[in-house]
Image: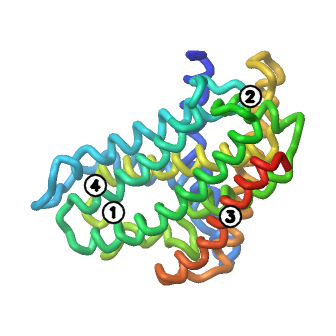
Amino acid sequence: MDLIGGLINLFLVMLIAPVLDGFARKVRARIHCRIGPPILQTWYDIIKLFKKKDIDAEVSSRLYLISPYLSLAFSLVAALIIPIGCKKPPLGFTGDVLLLVYLLASSSLLVAFGSTASGNPFSGIGASRMLSLTVLGEGMLAGSIVTFSVIAGSLRIGSITELLSTSPRLAAAVALIPLAVFVYLESERVPFDIHEAEPEIVGILVEFSGRKLGLIKYSMMIRSTVLATLLIDLAVPWWLADSYMIPFYIISIILWLLLLLLLTLIFTIVDSSLARYRISMAIEGLVPFLCISFLSIVLAFLGV
């Protein structure tokens, strides 16, 4: 493992994730003809939550107490597997793409299970909705990842990005469609979810407060940033530098930030123009993209 590269990855993701959320809030406010909060407002909110005292649910299990910490830990480890600025990820080994899918899924599921373990039936309703969407979403992610792995003939993310940067494929372009939808889904945006409603009566965060609520929100932001980076790596892999040599590495980092801002801008515009779906409609809307992910696998095996 490249220790310096890993530390840089963690620092960048941990720093930028709340800034992207603040940028999205600012753009959404402008679309609604409001001034909106400052871009760093999300950072202020997280710091404020970290300073507050936790109020634990009266009827809860150990999973409820530790799930915020585990969710954040899994999200941070996932950041070590994603190439940021360099084609070679800090934590790269054969099969790392499988670990990435496991970490992202576990980070998301831990929040839902921790919410259910709080003992609040309304939390269970929110967790049920989240799990229903997560099952389809993870299927889309798995289908896309399998497609890229078949194209590259490898389960290493570094090998996949290196091949795509020199040899684009139709199957890869098709696989990017469900992957983009999954990244949008995991960012908790309309029509699949409402980010602002999570702490309300039927949200998964209704029983979390103080430091735990801050950790979960921070974990969600980091996971969304990691997924957005994965989408950028696979969609436009030529922006990645071949090594950590300066100045190419620094230029790649700057391009990564610009692409993240552009993707956040696009997602926020879409988010501001839609209304939230009922869970049945949300599931029906995701099924076609799941089928597209399976189609991309077939195309990859056909060598298209």
For badge 2, the amino acid type reads: Lys
Residue annotated with mark 3: 267
Residue 39 rendering spot, x and y as whole percentages = 61, 54
State the image quarter where residue 156 is shown: top right
Label drawn at residue 205: 1
Residue annotated with mark 4: 114
Helix, strand or loop under label 4: helix
Q: Name the image quarter holding the N terminus.
A: top right
For badge 3, the amino acid type reads: Phe
State the image quarter where residue 27 is shown: bottom right
Marks 4/2: CA distance? 35 Å
Helix, strand or loop under label 3: helix
Is 183 left, or right, of 295 in this rendering? left
**Disc nearer the start of the sequence (2/3):** 2
Q: Is residue 208 above or below residue 94?
A: below
Residues tagged 3 and 1 counted as in contact (Cβ below 8 A): no
